Image (tube, rainbow, N blue to C red):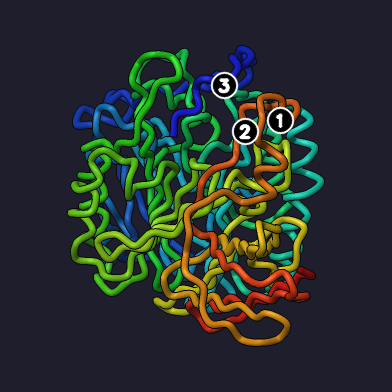
């Protein structure tokens, strides 16, 4: 979704973010450009660990050793952290990537987890998209404590997070503010690149990612926890003209992904995180789906649209998340009526359960309902923002069961009230209501006094909302 018409030009980067990201010169290692090393844990070799430079994918042998022929365009070498070990972080930001030393040696030391990780949770933050200090203040006062409380409620369960892009809004001075938000949440967090995280003054697609990489490392990589394999991809292609981009996964990434997945069990739970939705906005999504054809348990985590939508395509479930920022920090909901918030996921072996957590609301709030008066009748509108076809939505009039509701396209009434009009909302009037297909409508007699809706998700959990008619 191209929102370029309303984006203001950001301030120039401060020089503190200009970290050198030149490709590794092969002379740094040896004449043949090899990098090698050992992966150990508590002094013992760890076999079968995946190491990559984004082009080649190798595994450690039984003695924990590996050797990698570094590609001339490689900027990083990273470890695909294996299950059973802690993620390497710095103030909660994932630091799974490295630069080799002058000897061409790069050793990795893994710290074992203190518990089995087959059961674990993860959180998806989509589009925090902070533009200025006021946005940051809202994020720190609302989203951060809310997420922190959810993490606290999980007890001793292992949990990590993934930001699926637009961490900031073209203002790279605010990357440290995002980092501080993550540090306060206090769990390991991985980052994906969004279109607003690209530097459009750095040339073409290959160079527009440099500032992001200086801060967060490679834009595509993988890691593991329990029986789940996680992949982060960059599906934002900068087209060389300022603020012009499309959804595209480069052949280099697809080739790397194919190599990476050759080393993953076909019955694994595969979680792929990226910014732009794949199902309808990535131009070469058929090529992408082809790489995944042997995997039957795949979930895609995306953002970008500023609405919430669940889609199943080619047997793959895509979760397109509502935003952390809601209406670009101008209101408490996204354009489709989904409250600002984030996804919460629970992994048990290869099984995945999930819910959408609305910022500042109880976990049980999963729908909004409205009643309006028409000529000679009243109308119920229910917005069930994390709906998918496995949900059941029923309604009751004055306590009498009236059956199930079916989906209708339309606009959320609160979104229309908050965002419809040339001068609304202040100070970002470009925010508009967005038509959504997770609305449910019913008409009834004016004499009805009370309306209730019960939505049951695909896991059998029931959520209720009631309103006086």
Which tag is nearer the camera, tag 1 or tag 2? 1
Mark pair 1, 3: CA separation: 14 Å
Answer above or below: position of 462 versus 251.
below
Q: How packed is label 3: few (under 14 Cα within 10 Å), some, or many (20 or more)?
A: few
Q: Which disc, if any, is residue 38?
A: none
The residue at 34%/41% (across/down) is 281
Residue hosting label 1: 424
Q: Is residue 345 above or below residue 272?
A: below
Q: Quadrant of the C terminus?
A: bottom right
Residue at screen point 77% across, 57% down:
360
Contact, CB < 8 Å: mark 1 with mark 2?
yes
Element on which disc 2 rests: loop
* Of callouts 1 and 3, the N-terminal one: 3
Kindly check if marks 2 and 3 are in contact, taking CB atoms under 8 A apart as contact. Answer: no
Q: Nearer the viewer, residue 309 or 240?
A: 309
Q: Where is residue 125 drawn, in percent x and y?
A: 58, 50
Q: Which residue is mark 3?
A: 6
How far, Cα to Cα, is label 2 from label 3?
Answer: 9 Å
| Mark 2 surroundings: few (<14), some (14-19) or many (≥20) residues within 10 A | many
- Which mark identifies residue 431? 2
Report helix, strand or loop for mark 1.
loop
Callout 1–callout 3 Cβ contact below 8 Å: no
| Mark 1 or mark 3, whichever is nearer to me | 1
Which residue sits at x=81%, y=46%?
141
Residue 415 appears left or right of 269: right
Residue 401: x, y in percent?
A: 61, 86
Q: Is residue 80 visible in the rendered structure shown here? A: no
| Quarter placement of the N terminus | top left
Residue at point 36%, 39% (across, down): 235
């Amino acid at each position: 979704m191209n929102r370029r018409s309303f984006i203001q030009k950001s301030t120039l980067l401060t020089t503190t973010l200009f970290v050198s990201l030149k490709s590794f010169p092969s002379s740094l290692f040896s004449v043949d450009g090899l990098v090698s090393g050992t992966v150990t844990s508590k002094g013992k070799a760890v076999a079968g660990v995946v190491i990559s430079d984004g082009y080649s994918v190798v595994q450690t042998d039984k003695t924990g050793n590996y050797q990698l022929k570094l590609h001339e365009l490689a900027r990083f070498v990273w470890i695909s952290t294996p299950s059973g070990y802690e993620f390497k972080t710095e103030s909660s930001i994932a630091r799974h990537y490295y630069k080799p030393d002058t000897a061409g040696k790069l050793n990795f030391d893994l710290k074992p987890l203190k518990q089995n990780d087959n059961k674990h949770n993860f959180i998806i933050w989509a589009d925090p998209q902070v533009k200025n200090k006021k946005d940051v203040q809202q994020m720190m006062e609302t989203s951060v404590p809310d997420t922190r409380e959810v993490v606290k409620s999980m007890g001793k369960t292992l949990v990590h997070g993934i930001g699926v892009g637009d961490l900031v809004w073209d203002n790279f001075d605010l990357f440290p503010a995002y980092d501080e938000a993550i540090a306060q949440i206090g769990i390991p967090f991985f980052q994906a690149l969004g279109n607003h995280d690209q530097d459009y003054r750095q040339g073409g697609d290959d160079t527009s990612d440099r500032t992001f990489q200086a801060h967060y490392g490679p834009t595509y990589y993988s890691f593991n926890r329990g029986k789940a394999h996680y992949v982060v991809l960059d599906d934002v292609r900068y087209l060389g003209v300022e603020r012009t981009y499309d959804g595209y996964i480069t052949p280099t990434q697809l080739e790397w992904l194919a190599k990476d997945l050759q080393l993953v069990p076909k019955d694994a739970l595969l979680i792929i995180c990226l910014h732009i939705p794949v199902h309808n906005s990535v131009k070469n999504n058929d090529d992408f789906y082809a790489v995944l054809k042997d995997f039957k348990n795949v979930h895609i985590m995306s953002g970008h649209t500023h609405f919430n939508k669940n889609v199943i395509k080619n047997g793959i479930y895509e979760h397109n998340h509502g935003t952390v920022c809601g209406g670009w920090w101008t209101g408490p909901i996204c354009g489709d009526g989904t409250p600002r918030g984030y996804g919460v996921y629970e992994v048990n072996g290869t099984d995945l359960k999930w819910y959408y957590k609305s910022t500042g609301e109880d976990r049980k709030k999963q729908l909004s309902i409205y009643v309006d008066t028409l000529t000679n009748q009243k109308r119920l509108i229910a917005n069930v923002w994390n709906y998918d076809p496995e949900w059941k939505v029923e309604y009751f009039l004055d306590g009498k069961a009236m059956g199930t509701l079916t989906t209708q396209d339309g606009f959320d009434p609160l979104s229309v009230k908050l965002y419809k009009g040339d001068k609304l909302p202040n100070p970002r009037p470009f925010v508009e209501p967005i038509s959504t297909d997770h609305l449910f409508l019913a008409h009834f007699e004016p004499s009805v006094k009370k309306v209730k809706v019960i939505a049951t998700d695909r896991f059998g959990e029931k959520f209720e909302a009631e309103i006086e008619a």
